[in-house]
């Protein structure tokens, strides 16, 4: 069996933590690990040393994102925003009435600009989904929650948290059964409609450039 490199071992541990098969280490010597100890394919893209855990909610917490069509249009809007503002997407989940994202800081503009653009784009493209008796409900609440993530353990905890959301809510029995998240990218290397920054994505880029 080929010997794995240090980066591959670290990446495998990250995957196991994300899918809930292994807890992250809590040894005192590692308690203050920063993102520079993440797999190198992730580390090199955190120029500021920070990533952002973003949450925004549908208007009055209405289930505007419960249809497959609305979810597909949101995922497509997220991929367009990623390309336009040049931020990295480490994970996401689309729930019936809210969305969680884990992203890097954009290379173009700011997080606020990128999220505003994403909300406007997804709102316009899902407008027909919200028509009722000639009236149209707004898609999103005006504000959003943004938490800076500086710590490796918190990074993994946020990914595990939102990947488990659909199971916790009783929408599916297993995280991999929920189509509208990045879980299957990590667990099965599947294309989820958005480029997820991971070792597999980095390897794919290297192959394409070879």
Image (tube, rainbow, N blue to C red):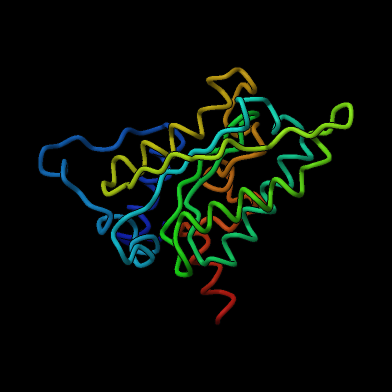
The x and y percentages for residue 129 are 81, 36
Quarter of the image with the N terminus in it: bottom left
Number of callouts in the render? 0
Residue situated in front as seen by the camera: 21 or 81: 81
Name the outermost residue toward the top: 170
Q: Residue at x 48, y 69 (%)?
A: 108
Rendering quarter of residue 61: top right
Q: Residue at x 85, y 28 (%)?
A: 132
Q: Is residue 206 above or below residue 164?
A: below
- Left or right: residue 30 compared with residue 21: left
Rendering quarter of residue 31: top left
The x and y percentages for residue 50 are 32, 55
Name the outermost residue toward the front: 135
Name the outermost residue toward the bottom: 210
Q: Is residue 198 above or below residue 96?
A: below
Residue situated in front as seen by the camera: 137 or 66: 137
Q: Is residue 152 above or below residue 96?
A: below
The x and y percentages for residue 59 are 63, 31
The x and y percentages for residue 79 are 63, 57
Q: Residue at x 45, y 69 (%)?
A: 107
- Left or right: residue 122 compared with residue 170: right
Residue situated in front as seen by the camera: 9 or 123: 123
């Amino acid at each position: 069996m080929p010997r794995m490199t240090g980066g591959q071992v670290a990446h495998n541990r990250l995957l196991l933590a994300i899918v809930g098969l292994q807890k992250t280490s809590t040894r005192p010597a590692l308690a203050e690990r920063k993102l520079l100890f993440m797999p190198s394919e992730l580390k090199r893209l955190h120029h500021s040393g920070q990533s952002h855990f973003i949450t925004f909610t549908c208007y009055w917490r209405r289930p505007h994102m419960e249809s497959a069509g609305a979810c597909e249009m949101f995922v497509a809007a997220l991929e367009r925003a990623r390309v336009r503002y040049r931020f990295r997407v480490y994970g996401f989940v689309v729930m019936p009435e809210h969305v969680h994202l884990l992203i890097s800081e954009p290379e173009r503009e700011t997080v606020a600009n990128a999220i505003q653009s994403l909300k406007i784009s997804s709102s316009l493209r899902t407008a027909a989904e919200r028509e009722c008796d000639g009236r149209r409900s707004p898609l999103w609440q005006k504000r959003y929650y943004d938490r800076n993530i500086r710590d490796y353990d918190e990074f993994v905890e946020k990914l595990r948290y939102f990947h488990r959301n659909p199971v916790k809510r009783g929408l599916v029995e297993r995280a991999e059964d929920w189509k509208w998240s990045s879980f299957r990218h990590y667990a099965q290397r599947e294309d989820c409609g958005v480029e997820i920054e991971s070792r597999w994505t980095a390897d794919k880029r290297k192959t394409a450039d070879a």
